């Protein structure tokens, strides 16, 4: 049953909002099963697993709003959690679901002392003890435990009585307990400084920050605690900024843009955020030492190997630099990036296309992801006139990344949003980007979405040239095959350009010593020639008249050169057999005229290829 529920929920991963109208009904059925006292424990476990599948799709914050939050649920829910053992890892879905339910129940607008009874310890202490117990766990339920703890400790009736004691207890944990336990405590502190009111947090901020900056974590511990460590340091400083800056900035936190790259230019179009800056007074006040320490820690975190740590550090720098003077903010920004003109014109667009082979795997997805996010941030932060000189180059790189990124889920949402923001409203030439959509299957992206985008002349040359320069020689065999098929379809859109590219760039590579380049070029040549033959038939013209004598001779010479080199008998012979067989099939189906001697040599080559054990080669030979 749980597998069926998981399969149903996974269908909504791309558009999770579609299940919102059904959430109340689904959750009511699950909660009724949980509340039923006579049911077997394993049945309730199945119900909690189904709840978690829904959480994976829609997110715990949305689901929590649909859970019941009556005062009558507090005591039985707390009793249920107290009787659970966080060490039983096979039942972590139960712990996670109960803690999620508790996160909405503890928000009830009544003083919790009203629910105390004379037969048990105060309910406020019981909730805190439950939170501490699950913070020490090692399962996924720990993530929900520190979320509940942060919400609970920032309640008005709890913060004065229990928050100081929790901070002292957290200090003890950070100095002697396990790394996983420290992760839970640090995450709780980060949540406390996120949800708590600024006035509430001021008296604790300095002590917590000093504790975190002075504790020396072991290298093995940093692998686990680095992300929450970065989060809590930046949030502490942000909460106390209005005191450090003495009201110099008027900032509305809930609506200010997160500016990852201020770059020393005027920031415009941040809705509902009033930032008043007097550049003449930039040097009139000193920046506290704590801010410099935190910025240094976050800058170091940017170099961490963990992607999540890097993202957290980037957001922290953006939040901090948007709240300090321009002169001081320029220092960490210049440590992170090059000047803006160079970034936009050269390195930035190149980063969106970066993909490099290292051994048997490639690197570059993180770089492309960050570049797409940066484009999205620039479009949100800067006035359109500042980016106007770079619109065409940005549009080209964004569209290429959206269509041809090998890892389609990497940065695509930011890339699509960045395409619309950076190009859609800057110039009428680039409004076609509004039609781009995310295609989950790579095959559909190459053969459907690319054809749709190539209909527009301002994008077509860039798409074709990108395929020629990067995808024909790509290290992934599937990419090279899809590239050849994309060339076949684009030839019908612009046969004149494809004839020129075929003669000058693709055919000369068919005998290149490099395996990837040779294999991709032979596949692409066959598909383009086949499409040009079909174009000639559609125009009711002779093929020599359509292609020209020079192109005809070049194709014939390439056919002879491939046969003479006999690449299928060298390194990578299996790939070359498939490529040569595809090439022969494409020219034959297109009706390309060749001398009888060349055809005889083709037949001999096909007989040699039949000796291969690859079934794909056999299929192409018999076809």
Image: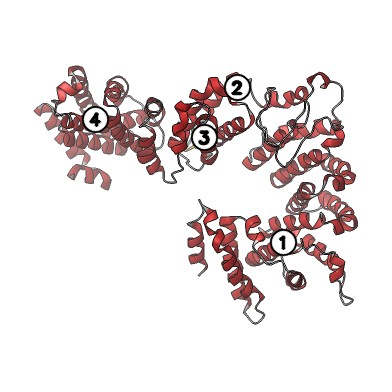
Assign a secondary structure to mark 1: helix
Compared to residue 248, the image places residue 119 above or below, namely below
Assign a secondary structure to mark 2: helix
Point out residue 503 in the picture as x, y percentages from the top left corner: 27, 21
Tell me the colour scheme of the image. Answer: secondary structure
- First along the sequence among labels 4 and 3: 3
Q: CA distance from mark 3 to mark 1?
A: 37 Å
Which-is-in-front pick, marks 1 and 4?
1
Q: Nearer the viewer, residue 451 or 185?
A: 451
Q: Residue, x 20% and y 22% (percent of image)?
A: 547
Q: On the rendered structure, is 246 left or right of 600?
A: right
Residue position marked by numbered label 3 in the rendering = 420
Residue position marked by numbered label 4 in the rendering = 566
Q: Quadrant of residue 251?
A: top right
Label 2 close to label 3 by CB (< 8 Å):
no
- First along the sequence among labels 3 and 1: 1
Residue position marked by numbered label 1 in the rendering = 104
- First along the sequence among labels 1 and 4: 1
Residue position marked by numbered label 2 in the rendering = 386
- Outermost residue to the bottom: 38
Q: CA distance from mark 2 to mark 4?
A: 56 Å
């Amino acid at each position: 049953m749980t597998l069926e529920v998981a399969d149903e929920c996974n269908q909504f991963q791309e558009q999770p909002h579609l299940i919102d109208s059904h959430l109340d009904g689904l959750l009511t059925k699950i909660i009724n099963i949980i509340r039923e006292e006579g049911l077997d424990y394993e049945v309730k476990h199945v119900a909690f697993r189904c709840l978690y599948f829904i959480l994976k799709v829609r997110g715990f914050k949305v689901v929590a709003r649909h859970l019941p939050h009556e005062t009558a649920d507090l005591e039985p829910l707390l009793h249920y959690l107290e009787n659970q053992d966080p060490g039983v890892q096979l039942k972590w879905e139960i712990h996670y679901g109960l803690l999620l339910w508790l996160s909405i129940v503890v928000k009830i607008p009544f003083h919790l002392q009203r629910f105390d009874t004379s037969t048990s310890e105060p309910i406020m202490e019981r909730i805190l003890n439950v939170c501490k117990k699950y913070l020490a766990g090692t399962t996924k339920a720990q993530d929900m435990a520190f979320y509940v703890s942060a919400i609970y400790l920032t309640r008005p009736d709890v913060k004065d009585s229990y928050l100081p004691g929790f901070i002292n207890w957290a200090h003890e944990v950070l100095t002697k307990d396990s790394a996983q336990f420290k992760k839970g405590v640090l995450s709780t502190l980060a949540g406390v400084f996120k949800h708590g009111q600024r006035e509430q947090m001021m008296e604790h901020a300095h002590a917590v920050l000093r504790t975190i900056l002075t504790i020396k974590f072991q290298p093995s511990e940093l692998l686990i605690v680095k992300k929450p460590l970065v989060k809590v340091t930046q949030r502490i400083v942000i909460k106390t900024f209005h005191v450090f800056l003495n009201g110099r900035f008027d900032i509305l936190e809930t609506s200010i843009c997160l500016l990852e790259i201020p770059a020393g230019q005027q920031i415009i179009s941040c809705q509902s955020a009033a930032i008043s800056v007097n550049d003449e007074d930039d040097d009139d006040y000193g920046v506290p030492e704590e801010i410099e320490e935190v910025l240094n820690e976050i800058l170091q975190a940017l170099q961490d190997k963990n992607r999540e740590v890097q993202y957290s550090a980037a957001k922290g720098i953006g939040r901090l630099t948007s709240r300090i003077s321009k002169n001081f903010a320029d220092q960490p920004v210049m440590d992170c990036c090059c000047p803006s003109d160079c970034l936009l014109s050269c390195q930035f667009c190149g980063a969106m296309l970066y993909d490099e082979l290292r051994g048997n795997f490639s690197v570059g997805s993180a770089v492309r992801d960050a570049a797409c996010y940066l484009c999205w941030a620039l479009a949100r932060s800067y006035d359109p006139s500042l980016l106007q000189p770079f619109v065409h180059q940005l549009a080209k790189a964004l569209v290429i990344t959206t269509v041809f990124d090998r890892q389609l889920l990497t940065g695509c949402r930011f890339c699509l949003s960045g395409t619309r923001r950076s190009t859609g409203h800057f110039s009428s030439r680039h409004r076609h980007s509004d039609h781009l959509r995310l295609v989950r299957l790579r095959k559909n992206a190459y053969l459907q979405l690319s054809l749709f985008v190539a209909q527009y002349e301002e994008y077509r040359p860039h798409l074709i040239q990108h395929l020629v320069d990067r995808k024909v020689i790509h290290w992934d065999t599937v990419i090279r095959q899809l590239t050849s098929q994309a060339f076949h379809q684009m030839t019908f859109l612009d046969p004149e350009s494809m004839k020129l590219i075929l003669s000058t760039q693709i055919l000369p590579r068919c005998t290149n010593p490099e395996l990837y380049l040779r294999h991709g070029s032979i596949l692409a040549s066959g598909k383009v020639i086949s499409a040009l033959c079909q174009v000639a038939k559609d125009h009711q013209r002779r093929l020599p008249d359509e292609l020209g004598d020079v192109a005809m001779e070049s194709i014939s010479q390439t056919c002879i050169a491939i046969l003479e080199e006999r690449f299928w008998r060298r390194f990578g012979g299996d790939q070359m057999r498939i490529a040569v067989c595809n090439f022969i099939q494409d020219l034959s189906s297109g009706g390309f005229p060749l001398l009888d001697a060349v055809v005889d040599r083709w037949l001999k080559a096909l007989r040699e290829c039949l000796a291969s054990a690859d079934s794909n080669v056999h299929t192409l030979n018999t076809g």
